[in-house]
Image (spheres, rainbow, N blue to C red):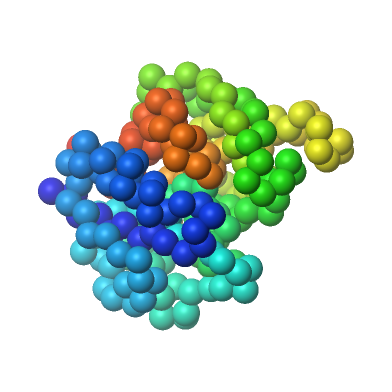
Amino acid sequence: MTRVLYLYGGWPGHKPYEIAEKWAKPLFAELGFDVEETNDIFALDADLTGYDLIALNWNNALLAEGLSAAQEHSLLSAVEAGTGIAAWHGAAAAFRLSIRYHLLLGGSFLEHPAGEGVKHPYQVSIVDKQHEITRGVLDFRVASEQYYMSVDPNNTVLAETTFDGEHLPWLAGRTMPQAWTRTWGSGRVFYSAVGHDLDDLQNPAVTRLCAQGFAWAARKGA
């Protein structure tokens, strides 16, 4: 059975506990994952190599938070050895002082042009239609935080969005990756930027994208 460490909690604005109960844990159960859940970042001090997947929905309360050197080493070493990472939304704003964490993840949150928590409508377009993660996922619209991020050019981009320039006119027409994959050593990494609110994640297209992303990162069936 696929062993998963699910780390969630932190800033309540991203509703990590509601999302855990109403979306993430039911989705893990549907995938047949054996999940160990924790709200304690010190869980990352342990040997993580026994997990097939680490699911991250930790949300920083402050920009000045980071992992300890031991936690960072434990996490990156496990992924290098083959443990997968599945992360969404606030994970790109977590552990801002841990540069190697963001190198692992493939991106770092910078801004939501419409404002924090604003349900700004935008389109997410699937750009890699051949990947197993995007199988059966069509372009979709959400009304949520539209993330502007610093993104590693080595990512394999699965989906992107285009800014309309309503709030920052100089961003009009600029595209930004919204879901991607990458590898770190033998480990697979999947990230999706959508997910500020529960209803974002419950969008059938988002749920399917994430379910297939989680399975891919965990090498389920591989």
Q: Residue at x 43, y 45 (%)?
A: 190
Residue 8: which quarter of the image? bottom left
Residue 142: which quarter of the image? top right
Q: Nearer the viewer, residue 26 or 99?
A: 26
* Residue 21 coordinates in the image, percent (x, y): 31, 47
Q: Nearer the viewer, residue 181 or 198?
A: 198
Figure check: 222 above or below 183? above
* Residue 115 coordinates in the image, percent (x, y): 71, 46
Q: Residue at x 39, y 37 (%)?
A: 210
Left or right, 116 with respect to 174, comes to left
Label total for image:
0
Q: Residue at x 29, y 75 (%)?
A: 46
* Residue 124 coordinates in the image, percent (x, y): 58, 28
Figure check: 180 above or below 102? above
Q: Residue at x 47, y 80 (%)?
A: 69
Residue at the extreme left:
1
Residue at the extreme right:
170
| Quadrant that contains the C terminus | top left
Residue 134 visible? The answer is no
Q: Nearer the viewer, residue 132 or 125?
A: 125
Residue 137: which quarter of the image? top left
Left or right, 2 with respect to 108, comes to left
Figure check: 202 above or below 11? above
* Residue 51 coordinates in the image, percent (x, y): 24, 60
Residue 154 visible? The answer is yes
